[in-house]
Amino acid sequence: MESGAVTGVDQEPREECGVFGVWAPGEEVAKLTYYGLYALQHRGQEAAGISVSDGSQVVVFKDLGLVSQVFDEQVLTALRGHVAVGHCRYSTTGSTTWENAQPTFRTTAAGSGLSLGHNGNLVNTAELRERTREAGLRDLVGATTDSDLVCGLLAATAVDIGLEQAALDLLPTLRGAFCFTFADETTLYAARDAHGVRPLVLGRLERGWVVASETAALDIVGASFVREVEPGELLAIDENGLRSSRFASPQPKGCVFEYVYLARPDTTIGGRSVHAARVDIGKRLADEHPAEADLVIPVPESGTPAAIGYAQSSGIAYGSGLVKNSYVGRTFIEPSQTIRQLGIRLKLNPLRDVIRGKRLVVVDDSIVRGNTQRALVRMLREAGALEVHVRIASPPVRWPCFYGIDFASRAELVANGADIEGIRRSIGADTLGYISLDGLVAASDQPRSRLCAACFDGEYPIPLPEDELIGKHLLEGLADPEPVLPLTGYGAQDAVQRP
């Protein structure tokens, strides 16, 4: 079990990261960013950070933990400026350490500061590492994230040609999924990869601009939605207004799993309400896999909209049969063996009077390793359920994601090499049904050609390197045996760590 997980049945796909940026003179940009990250907390719960610039210097404050654990009123009040970059992290490259928390920070040879937040995952990280060696950038030798390599390469070249041109030169050479928000002392930047795998949106404040991973973060800070940042687009926002540049031709391949699980239900992606898509998934799931049952219950919270849709389409009553502990979140305290054995009960507990004597349809968003569903089915039977019919709002996850979701390895995926009947037996359900990929795509309201569904069909739109040149801990495995110079960007006046 990974350190920091709250249960011993830790099987859920890990969210990626959330990014937020604001340019707004006269506003408390640190507090706006705090609330923006709060709205994006579901996308990353390992670490959080905010950088702020007042026009003369960039200051970064970051730490391990939830947004509300990292920041307090005193810290936010001290972070003064008009440009801010925020980030909440779940690691897809590099370990969970303070150094790897974001925004990452670097200084240029001219002494200018650069902070960067990243949502996604690059697949040519080893190539970037080699590029830093060839360029003699010794302070990047110890970098253990793709984000830090990108930040360092930008800082190294910006001194000669300016940050905007440095980005336009570097971004076309990056392969993989990325949404960057980055800033120097005066300007906020945002960039999205040519495939637009991860969402990134632009919003307008009365006195400024906001970029964020999801529209829900715009709502919480009172920004009006303007548009999505286009695939292959770089935005620059400063006192002269907003500028847009193209660094690559768009080849849209948005992640279909955002509609299933990753995004908040109150977010809109590609003009489609995520909540509406999930309700529609449930309706289609009921049509594809009907069941004779007395009650439809969701696995909260991500299974709730699909369960509502299933109940509406099937005519079976909808009910709440499971109570979720809203305060579990992530913790960095390892559970004791006794608590670990309780597993799923840390998060979910059955309402016995609702469940007893009922034939249940249980709707969940996905099955990855199968451990949670196995424990859940057992728990429902112990609570008195007569039958348990499991319905899943996504197709079988058979392939890992290399574009920003930390799934299990392929060997750990329960659907790898197993048919539906084998999975049903494994989790102990009476019946099991997954929505078809065609049904999921239809519910998203997006053309199949504009979606990435690699975790379901194994068709990766961005070519992958050899196995030994990819992976979460790739850069740690490539650590240089020579002594590493200190990171130039982490001076006491530039980056602040809570004691």
Image (spheres, rainbow, N blue to C red):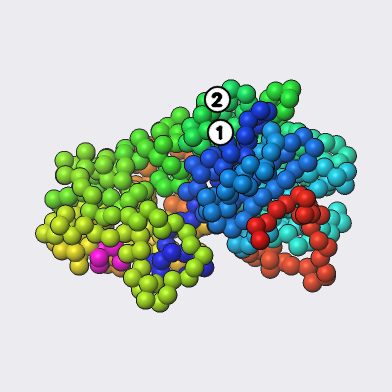
Q: Toward the viewer: 146 or 219?
A: 219
Q: Can you name the residue that lies furthest to the left here?
A: 357
What is the x, y in percent for residue 168? 75, 36
Instruction: State yes or no: discs 1 and 2 in contact (Cβ < 8 Å).
Output: yes
Q: Name the residue: 58% across, 49% down.
A: 71
Picture coordinates of residue 112 (x, y %)?
82, 42
Q: Amino acid at mark 1?
A: Val
Answer whether residue 85 is visible to the viewer in this image: no
Q: Where does label 1 land, which residue?
A: 201
- Place of residue 371 in the rendered image (x, y in percent of width and height, measured from the top left): 36, 66
Q: Judge by depth and name the residue closer to the eye, 442 or 180.
A: 180
Residue with the most extreme front position? 74
Residue pictured at 33% horizontal, 70% vertical: 342
Q: Circle 1 — which element?
A: strand
User: Could you tell me if residue 293 is visible in this image?
Assistant: yes
Query: From the viewer's perspective, is residue 241 above or below residue 9?
Result: above
Please provide the residue range marked out in magenta.
375-379
Q: Nearer the viewer, residue 323 or 303?
A: 323
Q: Which residue is mark 2?
A: 226
Task: Classify mark 2: helix, strand or loop.
Answer: strand
Q: Residue 482: which quarter of the image?
A: bottom right
Residue 96 in the magenta stretch? The answer is no
Q: 224 or 138: which is nearer to us?
A: 224
Q: Is residue 499 left or right of residue 137?
A: left
Q: Quadrant of residue 370?
A: bottom left
Rendered position, 193 above or below 346:
above
Q: Is residue 159 above or below residue 338?
A: above
- What percent of the width, then of the height, locates residue 266? 41, 36
Q: Residues within 10 Å of mark 2 (few under 14, many from 20)?
A: some
